[in-house]
Image (cartoon, grey):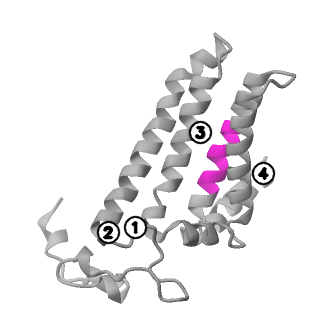
Amino acid sequence: MSSSFIESSFDYQSLLPSRFRSDRLDVESIEEPVDETGEPCSCFPEMTWRERLLGCVTCMLCGYMLSIGSFWRIKDLVINHDPLPFVLNATIGNIIALAGSFFLTGPKAQWKNMWLEKRRIATGLYLGSLFLTLFVAFLPIPGPEGFYLLLLMLCQYISITWYTLSYVPFAHDIIVSFVRRRISVS
């Protein structure tokens, strides 16, 4: 990276919200989130903000590594017709990754945010597909069980991606616009 970029006179910190501006970001000085009663919005009130971030990142990394690592077991699903190793690793990994956000906001606030209007459909699809995946994996159902499980896993990944993008400003609008342009061209 060129030194002119680093030595630039542009104040990059002016882009940050005021509570995050300083010469050096001091994570310990960030205020704890509180609910309407003034109580901390976390199930870990004694943890510092740095510890919360570490817990969140650790859960998310472990969850996503377990979830992505499950694709090494897809051959068990296809060849041996044994969906449990693939499905359980992926679904439990997704649950661990989602639980990582509890470190930041707490379960109550996370649950409330998940059901906001712009996230409601993605949340319902995600939680529904998590439940149905475990249901189909453990209970015998008629039909091609492996196909159902792959379809449910696909639904999990699509819905959690859409849910995550709801936190990025204008991401949904950009994706919908892109898809509409592609469909109109075809």
Q: Secondary structure at mark 2?
A: loop
Q: Residue at x 62, y 59 (%)?
A: 163
Quadrant containing the N terminus is: bottom left
Residue 92 lies, in percent from the top left, at 55, 40
Q: Which residue is mark 3?
A: 91
**Residue tagged by mark 1?**
44
User: 10 Å neighbourhood of mark 2: few (<14), some, or many (≥20)?
Assistant: some
Q: Secondary structure at mark 4?
A: helix
Q: Is the residue marked by circle 4 packed among few (<14), some (14-19), or many (20+) residues within 10 Å?
A: few
Question: What is the spatial separation of the Cα atoms under label 2 and label 3, in whole angstroms?
Answer: 28 Å
Q: Is residue 72 above or below residue 179?
A: above
76 or 32, nearer to the observer: 32
Q: Looking at the picture, which amino acid does disc 2 mark?
A: Met
Residues under numbered marks 2 and 3 in contact, where contact means CB atoms less than 8 Å apart: no
Cα gap from disc 3 to disc 1, whole angstroms: 25 Å
- The residue singled out by tag 4 in the image is 183
Lower sequence index among marks 2 and 3: 2
Q: Which residue is mark 2?
A: 47
Q: As displayed, is residue 72 above or below residue 132?
A: above
Are dots 2 and 1 in contact, CB under 8 Å?
Answer: yes
Mark 4 residue type: Ile
Over which residues does the magenta segment extend?
A: 152-162
* Mark toward the start of the polypeptide (3 vs 1): 1
Q: CA distance from mark 2 to mark 1?
A: 6 Å
